[in-house]
Image (cartoon, rainbow, N blue to C red):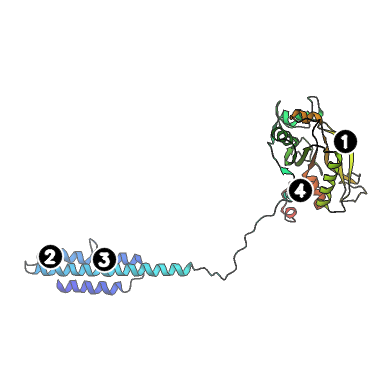
Amino acid sequence: MKTALEAIRAAAQQELSQIADAKALEGLRVKYLGKKGELTAILKQMGSLSAEERPIIGQLANEVRADIEARMEACQRELKARLQEQQLKNETLDVTMPGKRNVIGNKHPLNLVLDEIKEIFLGMGFDIVSGPEVEYDYYNFEALNIPKNHPARDTQDTFYINDNIVLRTQTSPCQIRTMETRKPPIRVIAPGRVYRSDAVDATHSPLFHQIEGLVVDKGVTMADLKGTLETFAKILYGPDAKTRFRPHHFPFTEPSAEMDVMCFHCHGEGCRLCKGEGWIEILGCGMVHPKVLQNCGIDPEVYSGFALGMGLERVAMRRYNIDDLRLFYENDVRFLSQF
């Protein structure tokens, strides 16, 4: 039995020296130290030994078990270290290799132009304000001197949620809210999405973007309005940009005007884009109606002001020589990637 124990020790030592992975090590443990292992089989024969041999063989059996267990633990540590080394080798990064370029999108052309317009007006001392797109009838119409029987209130022109709530048709309600909460002098622009029941064509859409401007102070005149807008047009379109002002009517301004920019497509000769006129309407403007100032608690005998409103899409079309507004909303990457 003593010889058998030494043979088990030698065999286990030999096999442990050739172990390649954790699975083989576990198999070796079961082979020698398991319930049906070779060492366990020897220990089961202890009952057949004499009283003098039993303690000697028992001590030797414990030494063999301890020796095999110690070697297995050492082997396990070595396998773990070897595995970790291999993982580190496999996961090593070559910092000299060029990185993968992250493909990112471009800003939408409308956002590019909006950012330019914001910078122009911020440079002239304006603040930027915003308001809700779902608006009360009062702020969208009544406070702007638009009576109940005005054509703009027709459901063919305006999207109604109910009798008192609409999708705003302009960002002018932001001007009313500003005048209600601020005291003059006031100098703000209000960009944002607006909604009108228009048929889709090259220059119209039921959803579009508008930028409203408002100045209220003592001594503000029509000359201030024209000077501001001509400065804006020449900064945005270049010093050769040609503009003209035409008399118009808006319920919330008096006098009122529309500003046109010479058609960039035909340079004034007339084409499909400008509908043969040679000019493209860019914005409406005028001096703030005294009744609108009164509605907001501002004394029109002391203060005056001017307001303006422009469609962002039309400005962007003039800025980038685009002849169809629908291109902005079709999500054609071939179009958008140009900007």
**Camera-side residue of 181 and 18:** 181
> Which badge, 2 or 3, is on the more N-terminal residue?
3
The residue singled out by tag 4 in the image is 117
The quadrant the C terminus occupies is: bottom right
Residue 239, given in percent of the width and then of the height, sits at: 86, 54
Secondary element type, mark 2? helix
User: Can you give x and y, in whole percent of width and height, for residue 107 in the image?
Assistant: 70, 52
Return the disc, 3 or 1, that comes first in the chain's sequence.
Answer: 3
From the top left corner, tell me how far across and down residue 21 is, in percent: 36, 68
Residue 144 visible in this rendered orientation of the protein: no
Q: CA distance from mark 4 to mark 2?
A: 98 Å
The quarter of the picture where residue 70 lies is: bottom left
Q: Quadrant of the N terminus?
A: bottom left
Q: Secondary structure at mark 1?
A: strand
Query: Are dots 4 and 1 in contact, CB under 8 Å?
Result: no
Badge nearest the viewer, 4 or 3: 4
Q: Which residue is mark 3?
A: 31
**For mark 2, what is the residue?**
46
Q: CA distance from mark 4 to mark 1?
A: 24 Å
Question: Could one spot residue 180 in this view of the protein?
Answer: yes
* Residue type pointed to by label 4: Ile
Residue under the point 73% across and 53% down: 336
Amino acid on which the number 2 mark rests in the picture: Met
**Residue type indicated by callout 1:** His
- Camera-near label (3 vs 1) is 1
In this rendering, the count of numbered labels is 4
Q: Which of disc 3 and disc 4 is earlier in sequence?
A: 3
Instruction: Name the spot of residue 153 as percent of width and height, x first.
Output: 78, 29
How far apart marks 3 and 1 lie (CA) works out to 101 Å
Please give the residue where the numbered disc 1 appears in the rendered image.
248
In the structure shown, which secondary structural element does the residue marked by tag 4 occupy? helix
Q: Who's the residue at 23% across and 70% down the image? A: 67
